[in-house]
Amino acid sequence: MSTRCGVVAVLGAPNAGKSTLVNALVGQKVAIVSPKAQTTRARLMGIALEGEAQMLLVDTPGIFNPSRRLDRAMVKAAWEGADDADRVVLVIDAAAKISNKVEQVIEGVEARSEPKILVLNKVDIAKKDDLLVLAAKLAERLSPEQIFMISASSGDGVADLKAHLAAAMPDGPWHYPEDQLTDATDRMVAAELTREQLYLQLHKELPYAAAVVTEKWEDQPNGSAVINQQIVVERDSQKAIVVGKGGSRLKAIGSAAREAISEHLGRKVHLYLHVKVNPRWAEDKGLYEDIGLDWSE
């Protein structure tokens, strides 16, 4: 059998479940997930296999109405992620109402020429009658080639979606080795895993404006890695939240992040974190390059 390979752009509003879906399609965690909206910042590609097909899944930031430079860069990255894709997958939170943010994404996808697949996510907590009405309305507007009703978190319906995507991929050689799951570097993944812990442990206390940069990485002769990371926040009060009383919160974040990074790398990790205050970090060109965003926006 000949191999197939293609690009699938996963679009949606913040918190629609795009990263959870990409992880489910890949079969392993490649994108960080948290209850905080706009957790995904840069485009990240998950690589999924199904039979002879390799699917390059572009997990994009949630699309919303941007105001700051960081917001504009994220939205630009999202729309660019769909350029020349073989399929555009629009993920809609079926348990929520069609807000202005969701409407903005629908309108943007509606205007695109790429073949579209509509995915109604979180159907396990959606009302059935509302779900059918929503599916009918969106089908009329978008004319998708297929509609899937799934729960990305539980995996229900994901196998059918994956099979459909695999069959839709064009003939061609695989672009990545069979055992590669993402295009992100280990340095980028390590920073993302630490940022995930920031949001999981402090999402009710810590504002959205925080970043993590891997400053130093040393592979040791015994196979372990020594990693130094900087957590950047905007204000001293935010630094106090991250550090916690007697450094307790930073220690907890570091412990959980170290475990996640070690699992990702498959080897022992020594992780050292420190917190820096930079009121204008969201204007730092170098930091944008580190997280894969276009500073010029």
Image (spheres, rainbow, N blue to C red):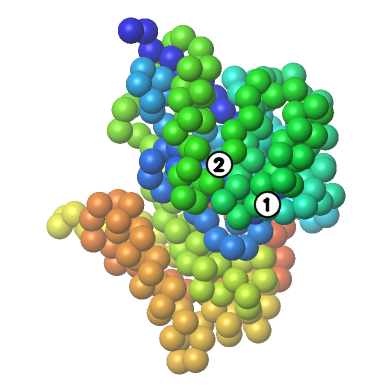
Answer left or right for 238 relative to 182: right
Location of residue 80 in the rendering, given as x and y in whole percent from the top left corner: 68, 32
- Point 80% across, 27% down: residue: 140
Q: Front-most of 45 and 229?
A: 45
Mark sitting on residue 150: 2
With respect to residue 230, does 33 lie above or below?
above
Q: What is the distance, in whole Å, between disc 2 and disc 1 at their CAs?
A: 13 Å
Mark 1 = which residue? 127
- Point 60% across, 47% down: residue: 123
Q: Quadrant of residue 143?
A: top right
Location of residue 83 in the rendering, given as x and y in whole percent from the top left corner: 67, 25
Answer left or right for 57 relative to 266: right
- Residue closest to the far front: 129
The quadrant of the rendering that contains the N terminus is top left
The quadrant of the rendering that contains the C terminus is top right
Question: Is any atom of residue 272 visible in this view?
Answer: no
Location of residue 252 in the rendering, given as x and y in whole percent from the top left corner: 41, 78
Question: Is any atom of residue 57 visible in this view?
Answer: yes
- Point 81% across, 51% down: residue: 99
Amino acid marked by disc 1: Lys
Location of residue 25 in the rendering, given as x and y in whole percent from the top left corner: 45, 37
Answer left or right for 169 relative to 181: right
Amino acid marked by disc 2: Ile
With respect to residue 242, does 187 lie above or below?
above
